[in-house]
Amino acid sequence: MKRFLRTGEPFIWLTGGALCLALLMVAGLIGLILVNGLGFFWPSAVTRLTLKDGGIVTGQLVEREAIPGKVGEHRIKLKVGNRDLYGADFVWIDESQVSDRTTPPEIAVIERTEWGALIGTIREVREGGAVVLAALSALDVSGRPATVREAHRQLVGYLTNQVHRMDYPTYRAKGWQIGSGPVESACKQVVGQRLKGSGMRWGEGGADAVCHLRALFRSEASQWDAFWATAA
């Protein structure tokens, strides 16, 4: 036995077993992350419920549980989104009240930065500030909560003041950029690379003049030449 231990073979097997165990734990952890995380990138199907009273509820099935105090009856939890319309992201519905259940393929789920997900059917796609403003102004929010009415008022006011800057179909037809990427890039290439050199200090007038020249310099050659021909 002592000779066997001196060979070190038991420790080799012990180390190999520990390594295999560690690899299995890592693989299990990765599998757990994938199982729980991939659902965020692959949304669940949207279910449309037709109730016995004629109502229709559309949303993603989240949970199903027994109804307390009612043997053999269950209820389901739906994520209906549209919190700006319904006031809540989720609703509970007794299965006994459901007369039909379908999964329409035309239902769209759109993630938003506020008010939760938007779940519904796309009837048409509208472009341009005037079109969007007209559609928003026509919305009847008189029966909605005060927070929704105030948000609607602020949005309509903002779009009214900015509608002359939102003729996107015309801009795109002319080949103009409507995203912020070119402007952000210009801040770096036109302004930052010229004015933020080591030891540079600028007054307002000098910085403004240099920025104009820098913009001409970074534009097409014809604009640079046309400017100096006019200045001369």
Image: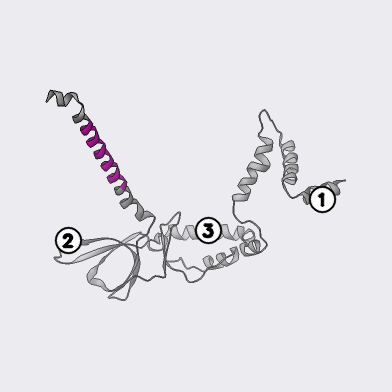
Q: Quadrant of residue 56?
A: bottom left
Query: Disc 2 or 1, which lies upstream in sequence?
Result: 2
> What residue is pinned by disc 2?
68
Q: Quadrant of the N terminus?
A: top left
Instruction: State the CA–CA distance, disc 2 to disc 1.
Output: 81 Å
Note whether 5 is above or below 30 in the view shown.
above
Per the image, the residue denoted by label 3 is 155
- Check contact, mark 3 vs mark 1: CB within 8 A: no
- Magenta residues (range): 12-30
- For the residue marked with disc 3, what is the amino acid? Leu
Q: Secondary structure at mark 2?
A: loop
Q: Residue at x 15, y 26 (%)?
A: 4
> Residue, x 85% and y 46% (percent of image)?
231
Depth order, front residue of 183/90: 183
Type of amino acid at the residue the image marks with label 1: Ala
| Residue at 68%, 36% in the rendered image | 195
Residue ID for mark 1: 226
Asked if residue 223 is among those painted magenta in the image, a careful observer would answer no
